[in-house]
Image (spheres, grey):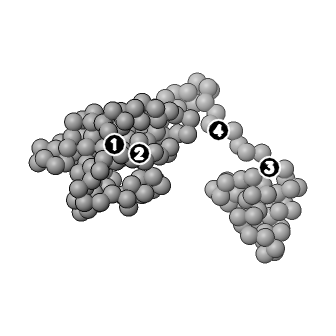
Amino acid sequence: MKFGYVRVSTIEQNTARQEVLMQELGVDKIFIDKTSGKTIDRSELKKLLDYVREGDTVIVESISRFARNTRELLYTVSILKEKKVEFVSKKENIDTATPAGKFMLTVFGAIAELERDYLLQRQAEGIAIAKQNGKYKGRKKIVVDKEKFEAIYNTWKSGEITAVKAMARLNLSKKTFYRRVKEYENLNLTKFS
């Protein structure tokens, strides 16, 4: 069987172009992720890797849709190889059923990683310039009512609720919640020092 893997970086991005390609290639089933490619921890990719069997083929529009660095690309393709599943990337014209395809996979994987590194470098340079010109202030800090935070913080610290419930009541992500806890505790420590 042929399986297509489609990925876009955000929920807002459209998968239609990749899906049309998969239909044109006659894939039997498509797995779609709407998340960054910088991590291998993608739900639909995991499902695909669990689902495929010997003799199947996994098709992607391009290597950058499958992985963003060479190590992860080669690791994921090695999982497919162990299962005797072929990997095909249409844009780069790579088919791991051939020795040349295996070689080109490594080369294009390295190029995709280099391309991502350049993109991140240009982004950082652009942000630095914008900051110098006073046009970039970063993300706005999430404002939390001080009294509400203190009340929920005290309830959490006393063990009456879990951290997860405290986060939900404050409508904060885990990272933001613990950052606020640290800020709050540091502020209170300096008051009593």
Crowd tier of the residue under label 4, counting other residues whose Cα lies within 10 Å: few below 14, some 14–19, many 20 or above = few
Q: Secondary structure at mark 2?
A: strand
**Number of the label disc, if any, that sits on residue 144:** 3
**Is 36 left or right of 190, judged from the image as shown?**
left
Q: Amino acid at mark 1?
A: Val
Q: Disc 1, disc 2: CB below 8 Å?
A: yes
Q: Is residue 50 left or right of residue 82?
A: right
Q: Give the residue displayed 27% in from the left and 40% down from the top.
A: 89
| Residue wearing tag 2 | 30
| Residue type for callout 4 | Arg
N-term-proximal mark, 3 vs 1: 1
Which of the two labelled residues, at mark 2 and mark 4, occupies the earlier sequence position?
2
Q: Of callouts 3 and 2, which one flags the residue occurring earlier in the amino acid sequence?
A: 2
Q: Position of residue 190 (x, y in %)?
A: 77, 62
For the residues labelled 1 and 4, the Cα–Cα distance comes to 41 Å
* Kind of residue at disc 3: Val
Q: Position of residue 79 (x, y in %)?
A: 29, 60
Label 1 – label 2 distance at C-alpha: 7 Å
Q: How far separated are the C-alphas under marks 3 and 2?
A: 42 Å
Q: Circle 1 — which element?
A: loop
Q: Nearer the viewer, mark 1 or mark 4?
A: 1
Q: CA distance from mark 3 to mark 4?
A: 15 Å
Q: Residue 180 is drawn in which quadrant?
A: bottom right
In the image, is 182 to the left or to the right of 114? right
